[in-house]
Each structure stands twice: as structure tokens, then as C-alpha cells.
Image (cartoon, grey):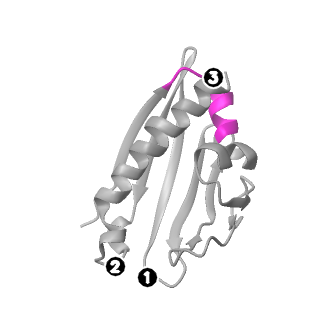
Amino acid sequence: MSIPFVTEHVYAASLEKVWRALTEKDKIQEWYFPQVRKFEPVVGFRFEFTDDGSPYGKEWVVTEVVDGRKLAHTWAYRNYPGSSEVTFELIEQGDKTKLALTHTGLESFPDDPHFARSRFENGWAQILGSNLKDYLERKG
């Protein structure tokens, strides 16, 4: 049975500012993945990453874009079975923005510690709860 991972964070930043952080390559490199070399918020666009020698090379493709509101992409690994999807949804809350993240398909990955659900949960806590929050506050 598939159980999506869902988390929400509220940022003291405008919806437009959070959207730019999600969709502009130079900003993505600062808080999400510095290895991102090419990205466009266009359905079907394949992220390009720097080859850092990791055996877990990412293969991500944009699957949905609702301008200013929603961005989704696959999350898969080169040379490993399984594919998941990450969806970022933004909700304006006055002068703040709520980001709801849903990560589905985690159970499709191999039964291996590298692909453990807890690693994704901890990763998203760091990426959204610390990295993005700090980026948005620092770039105020």
C-alpha cells in the first residue's frame, strides 16, 4: 500500500518569492540541490545535474506546473528501479506562504537503507525546514 509522505511549512515570504525559489535555477542551487545545472519549470523538462560521481545519479522530469502555485517532478535514480514524484503546492496566507509537499512512490525503490523512507523524511525536514527557510530569510 502506498503511503505518501506529506509535510507543510509556512514561510515569512511572499508567494512570488517562494515560487522563484522553486523555479529559478540559481536559487534552486542555493537551497535544494547545488548539483542542478539546467532546469526550466516546463512539463517534460529533464533536470540536468553535475556528475558528482555518486552511484545514485538523479533522473528528474517536470510533470506538472501551475504558474505560481504548483510544481511537480519525478524523483528517480539512474541504474536503480523505482520512481517517485514530488509535488510542491503553494498557498498564500497573508504576507506568508504555506508550502505543502507530497512525495509519493517511495515504496517503489529497492529495499535498501539508501532508499529508506526515513532518509527521505529527514532529507525533507532539512531541505524545507532549514535550507529553504534560511534561504528565504537570508535573501529577504
Q: Amino acid at mark 1?
A: Pro
Badge 3: residue crowd in 10 Å (few <14, some 14–19, many ≥20): some
Q: Residues within 10 Å of mark 1 (few under 14, many from 20)?
A: few
* Crowding at mark 2 (Cα within 10 Å: few <14, some 14-19, many 20+): few
Q: Report the number of numbered marks.
A: 3
Residue for badge 2: 110
Residue 49 occupies which quadrant of the picture? bottom right
Q: Which secondary structure is most common in the magenta stretch?
A: helix
Q: Is residue 19 magenta?
A: yes
Sequence-first tag of 1 and 3: 3
Q: Is residue 44 above or below residue 129?
A: below
The residue under label 1 is: 81
- State the extent of the magenta-drawn residues as a range: 11-21
Q: Secondary structure at mark 1?
A: loop
Q: Quadrant of residue 111?
A: bottom left
Image spot of residue 127 (x, y percent): 48, 45
Q: Can residue 68 be spotted in the picture? A: no
